[in-house]
Amino acid sequence: MMQPQIKTIPEKKLVGHHVLMTLTQNKTGELFRGFMPCRSEIQNMVGADIICMQVYDPNLNFNDVSIDTPHQKWAAVEVTDYSDIPKGMETFTIPGGMYAVFLYKGNPAAYGPTFNYIFNTWLPASPYEVDNRPHFEILGEKYKNNDPASEEEIWVPIRVK
């Protein structure tokens, strides 16, 4: 099965929109429909990649996450600085740290088995555990919504057990 790359990154500055949601009350579609037409207003972007980010309660034990766990879902882009924030947009800084980076190929809607593999197979067998920092996906030029040929990177925050 897929093996991740382990990467350590500096902090990332993001500008975008967010909503509070659960997986059972998934608002990802409406979040992105609201964000995508406005993203051209964002100055000083670092590349063209879109970041889809999940921010969980800092006190949450990740073993307790379920489809009903509330979290912030972000649609954002990375920027060099916060000097020019378009009206209606918000900022978020992802703290630097270590991530397991998985390349996911397939329809984004069919992500469930990959999620199960990462959290129930790969992670328990690895020398790592989930760290309490944001989880995110990088939707680059090979990302295609509702397309089995789509590719994205899944970034899972980790620390040594």
Image (cartoon, rainbow, N blue to C red):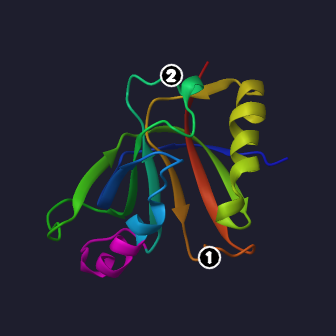
Residue farthest top in this picture: 161
Write the start and end of the magenta stretch as one range. 33-47
* Quarter of the image where one finds residue 19: bottom left
Camera-nearest residue between 104 and 48: 104
| Amino acid type of the residue that numbered disc 2 sits on in the rendered structure | Asn
Residue at 74% from the left image edge and 32% from the top image edge:
120
Q: 117 above or below 86? A: above
Residue at 70% from the left image edge and 23% from the top image edge:
127
The secondary structure that most of the magenta stretch takes on is helix
Residue at 67% from the left image edge and 68% from the top image edge:
151
**82 left or right, relative to 138:** left
From the top left corner, tell me how far across and down residue 110 is, in percent: 72, 60
SS state under label 1: loop
Kindly report the distance in space between the C-alpha atoms of the residues bearing marks 2 and 1: 32 Å
Query: Which badge, 2 or 1, comes first in the chain's sequence?
Result: 2
**69 left or right, relative to 110:** left
Q: 56 above or below 3? A: above
From the top left corner, tell me how far across and down residue 32 is, in percent: 42, 69
**Quarter that holds the C terminus:** top right
From the top left corner, tell me how far across and down residue 131 is, in percent: 51, 29
| Amino acid type of the residue that numbered disc 1 sits on in the rendered structure | Lys
Kindly identify which numbered label has been placed on residue 61.
Answer: 2
* Quarter of the image where one finds residue 30: bottom left
Camera-nearest residue between 24 and 85: 24
SS state under label 2: loop
Kindly identify which numbered label has been placed on residue 144.
Answer: 1
Q: 115 above or below 14? A: above
